[in-house]
Image (cartoon, coloured by chain):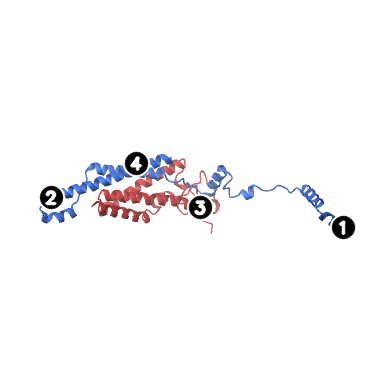
Amino acid sequence: MPPTKQELSLLINPLVSESLAHNNRVLTSLHSVTAFLLGLTAGILSLQSATGFAFYFLGTVVVSALFHALVLYRSRGWGAGMYFAGAQGEVLGLDERGIVRGKMVRRAAWRDVWFGGGVLGEALSGFVLGWAGVGGVLR
Amino acid sequence: MGFFSRLLTLFGLVLLAHAGYSAHEHTLLTSSTSSSRLNPLHSTTTTTTTTTHLPPDIIIEALVSLIVVSVGLVLGTEKLKPISWSEWAGQIEREGKGRHPYRRLEERYGFWDVRAKRKEFADWIRGTDLGEAVEAVEKK
């Protein structure tokens, strides 16, 4: 059985786990800090139940969009595939013999930018903390 | 970009704090007026359950400050490192030799100069008393 494209990608173009961990840590810290600030704002605006969570998702989308724009700018237009693993590190545009045409970027790495970084985990709990805390103090 | 982003974040945080304080003041004001207007029997229930409608300038201030802080924080993120081994190694090589992972292989000795080493050894052994002892052993 021939190796899959993902296996070939990792064999021929290995990932640097140190850099990967560093990038994910940067993303996670950004999301947790901004989620807390989103929670503070939601508390100031006295949002309730579903509106608050909708506000969180909207705010996270804005922050992710800003971060993605920055990543695009810093990678000179190559995108998140240079910094995030995406689909287990599969390289975009790899053919059966393992040859990459063009720049080496990882497939579906935008998912890491938009859904990664603990958006539905730690960041959400930080949001609820700020939301409830400021809501309790102000009212 | 570091100083600019920090300034932006600080400015946004001050704006956010101001919006929070304004919202607090507004809540105090509305709750006090509503409690004084109504009869004291209902005052306790109304103050706890008032749904305050914030004036639009506080809402706008909070949202704008949030965007400013987000932009500042995003601009202030650490630089990401390339994850592909080839890119990463190329960047390290361009930066300098300090963190080069293959420096051990890149900087090796050439051929060992046997003649120089032999001469060095002969000079050393002649300089010490050891040489006479060796000659004495060889004569026997």
Tag 3 and tag 4 share a subunit: no
> Label 3: chain?
A
Label 2 crowd bin: few (<14), some (14–19), many (20+), radius 10 Å: few
Which residue is located at x 28 percent, y 52 percent?
A: A134
Residue pointed to by mark 4: B11
For mark 2, give the secondary structure.
helix
> Label 2: chain?
B
**Mark nearer the N terminus (1 vs 2):** 2
Residue pointed to by mark 3: A18
**Mark nearer the N terminus (2 vs 4):** 4
Please tell me which residue lies in front, A59 or A138. Answer: A138
> Label 1: chain?
B
Label 1 crowd bin: few (<14), some (14–19), many (20+), radius 10 Å: few
Q: What label sits on residue B136 in the rendered view?
A: 1
Alpha-carbon span between mark 2 and mark 3: 63 Å
Label 3 crowd bin: few (<14), some (14–19), many (20+), radius 10 Å: few
Give the residue at the far left of this rendering: B39
For mark 1, give the secondary structure.
helix
